Image: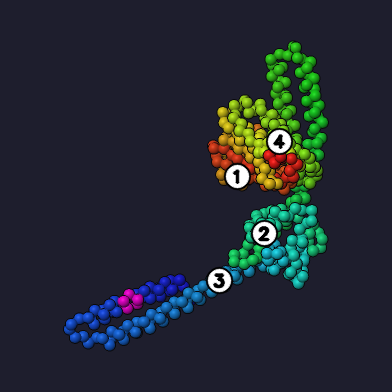
Amino acid sequence: MVTKAKVNRLRLLQWFTISVLIVLAAGFVWLQNQPFPTYYDDSVLAAIIIFLFILGLVQRRADSWLTATSMQSSFAANEEFNTLYQSSPVAYVTLDSKGQVQEFNPAAIRLLDGESDTMTGENFFDRIHPDFDFSVILGKIKSGLTVNEEEVPLCTFENQHIWTKLSVHSRPFEEKRMLSLIDITEQKAVDTAKSEFVALATHQLRTPIAAIRWNVELLEKKLADSVTDDQSRYLVKINRNVQRMVSLINDFLSVSKLETGTFASSQEAVNLSEFFDSIVDEFSEKISEKNITLNRVDNPPQLKVMIDGRLLHIIVSNLMSNASKYSNPNGTLDFSYALEENTLHIVVKDDGIGIPENELERLFSKFFRASNAQAHQTQGTGLGLYVVKQSVEKLGGVIEVTSKEDEGTQFSVSLPVSVLSNVSNQ
């Protein structure tokens, strides 16, 4: 059996032979230049020729064994891969760069309700549910980029709607894409039921919370001239906790509407300078309380765009809330927007507690809060950034985060917009 050790021994013999050949050749040259007579001319020349012949045989044998070893390893790897590919419970589909199905395993046939003699040549992209915005993922696939566990709805060959977790990898040196598909239809149904229940429950909670707020306001007015210090302290606590309940209810409602697709998006004209003014005013108390220096940039000022104002408010207010909450006293906070052609870039940056590097990937997960944020003893549900990401994606944008623990965090949001008026171009 060909082994690596055998090949290495042959290589060692080859180099030894070369060394001996060099020594003999040098000796032959030296003898030829001596004044005394020598009787080894022909024998040395014959020895050199013999060693050259041996060297050629050794080289050929070593190369043959190396080739055999490589072929055996490659064959074993392909056999192992094909076995896993065919027997895996995970659905695998191989496409060309245009989306035509080239290969598939039995699990893919079962998942897509297809047939082995009809799936080949079908365009997989036609299986994407028509109401789902697949453009960003499609661009990554065609560019040969990796896609990791994106939730994508598909239509099977029997016209059944299913939800899958899609991952895509490009094959090296080939214009092929390998897709893995995990059926999460039942999981999505459970999540939808949960979201609908949360929406119903939180909607019903609005009425009693509103009644509490109204009665507290009446009580404050009635006791305005006679309220004691203890009563005033109790009223402040009630108001603070009512506000927390309102924020929690709004977060849950936003999550449920975004997840169930019932959030009705509506475009409106928004003056971004005025909108940013309202956001700053919303958090001015917290900013003043911690003596935070606010660096504000509007580029260009008084820019008017068409966008969903409610989703924009969810995005920016949540980012500003986190920045003001986790900034250090006497710190700085950068709050800016800039227009680049038809893309709006929003940046919220603080120099606060930051986020541990190993937790950044989970930052936009539902109910997740960074470990140092929990230790910071600030209130939070872990829903804010999840809602932000969902809102950004609903607007067709992307959000990025860079952070270092104890040095601060920067969120960058890029959103496509329709520009209505731009003062800088007038």
Examine the residues drawn in magenta and state their main secondary structure: helix
Q: Quadrant of residue 368?
A: top right
Q: Is residue 203 visible?
A: yes
Q: Nearer the viewer, mark 3 or mark 4?
A: 4
Residue topped by disc 4: 302
> Quick one: SS at disc 1?
helix
Residue at (74%, 63%) from the top-left corner? 124
Query: Could you give the CA–CA distance between mark 1 and mark 3, rounded to whole angstroms?
Result: 38 Å
Check disc 3 and give the amino acid type: Ser
> Quick one: SS at disc 2?
helix
**Mark 4 nearby-residue class (10 Å; few <14, some 14–19, many ≥20):** some
Residue topped by disc 1: 360
- Looking at marks 2 and 1 on the same chain, the residue that comes earlier in the sequence is marked by 2
Residue at (44%, 77%) from the top-left corner? 62
- Looking at marks 3 and 4 on the same chain, the residue that comes earlier in the sequence is marked by 3
Q: Disc 1 vs disc 3: Cβ atoms closer than 8 Å?
A: no
Q: Quadrant of residue 276?
A: top right
Residue topped by disc 2: 141
Check disc 4 and give the amino acid type: Gln
